[in-house]
Amino acid sequence: GNKRASDDLKGLTRESERSSERSSEREMVLKATQLGSRAGAPRLAAQSRAVRRGGSRGISTARAAMDPSKTAVVLIEYQNEFTTEGGKLHDAVKGTMDSTGMLANTKSVVEKARAQGCKIVHAPISFSDDYKELSDGIYGILANVKEGGCFKASEWGAQICDELAPAEGDVVIEGKRGLDGFASTNLDFVLRQNQIENVVLGGFLTNCCVESTMRTAYEKGYQVVTLTDCTAATSEQELEASVNNTWPMFSKPMTSEDFLGNL
């Protein structure tokens, strides 16, 4: 049932936690080298935490203004399975959803960004009832999705949550079957057709689909912003590790308030 799916997802992500911690240490050393001092790495981590919590503590979060007409807010998997009580994976992410206030923050971002002329892009994941899109030998997180019966297109769990229901002018991306929002979809086509240069990310999971999409957007040459208070993971440790150690390598992390202030 829902508890098993949530437990499986938590178990899988905990397995990666130890290796994430080791890779995080390596990344921190690399950053320290780039800054010319080992002391630079913990300083960068402290800055990331301060930005995520919305208090600069003397750290400048000023960014160049973004043109709304060239900016897309990409909403990754804001679907009932994650967002809503009764969703098969909701219990696994509820803790970090509550700690960041990510659903209310995202709703505020979407309403204000849409009003200013940003393109709102929804990137849901879904599968057929028999998961024919996935191989019999699928492993990792997608195996847990399949075994848990999650994100079936025919079910309520795969629907975009009511709080972020697509409005007129929004775009719903087609074909997301994996982690990276670009890999099996028309996302890049939609962004380029709309002359988008700035890609702003929020959603689930912080260290999985959000991070995968962030890396590809960076490689494709977009200006990438990740919203530090608009994502959720299965634990605070995983969320912090991704936001503090990985996001700054491939994006410009900022709070939802800072982003809206730069439009």
Image (cartoon, grey):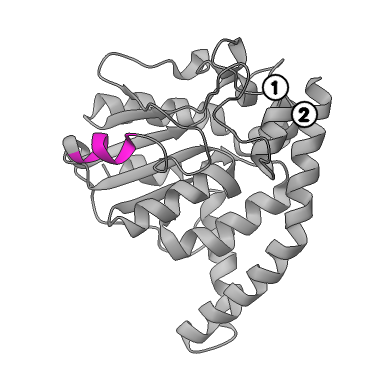
Compare residues 147 and 38 and report the one nearer the observer: 147
Q: Give the quarter of the figure containing the C terminus.
A: top left
Mark 1 or 2, which is nearer the eye?
Answer: 1
Q: Is residue 45 above or below residue 6?
A: below
Residue denoted by label 1: 149
- Of labels 1 and 2, earlier in sequence is 2
The reply to whether residue 55 is visible in this rendering is no
Instruction: Tell me the residue that label 2 is attached to.
Output: 5
Judge whether 129 appears above or below 70 on screen: above
Please provide percent x and percent y for residue 250.
43, 61
* 189 within the magenta span: yes
Q: Where, by quadrant of the figure, is residue 192 drawn?
A: top left
Residue extending furthest toward the front: 136
Which amino acid, by three-letter code, is at mark 1?
Answer: Gly
* 123 over 2 or under it: above or below: below
Locate the N terminus by quadrant: top right
Q: Is residue 110 visible?
A: yes
Local crowd size for mark 2, using a 10 Å CA cut-off: few (<14), some (14–19), many (≥20):
many
The one of 171 and 128 positioned closer to us in this rendering: 128
Please indicate whether residue 114 sits to the left or right of residue 59 in the image.
left
Say what secondary structure mark 1 lies in. loop
Q: Quadrant of residue 92?
A: top right
Residue 173 in the image: x percent, y percent? 37, 28
Mark 1 in CB contact with mark 2 (< 8 angstroms): yes
In the rendered view, tell whether residue 148 sits above or below residue 66: above
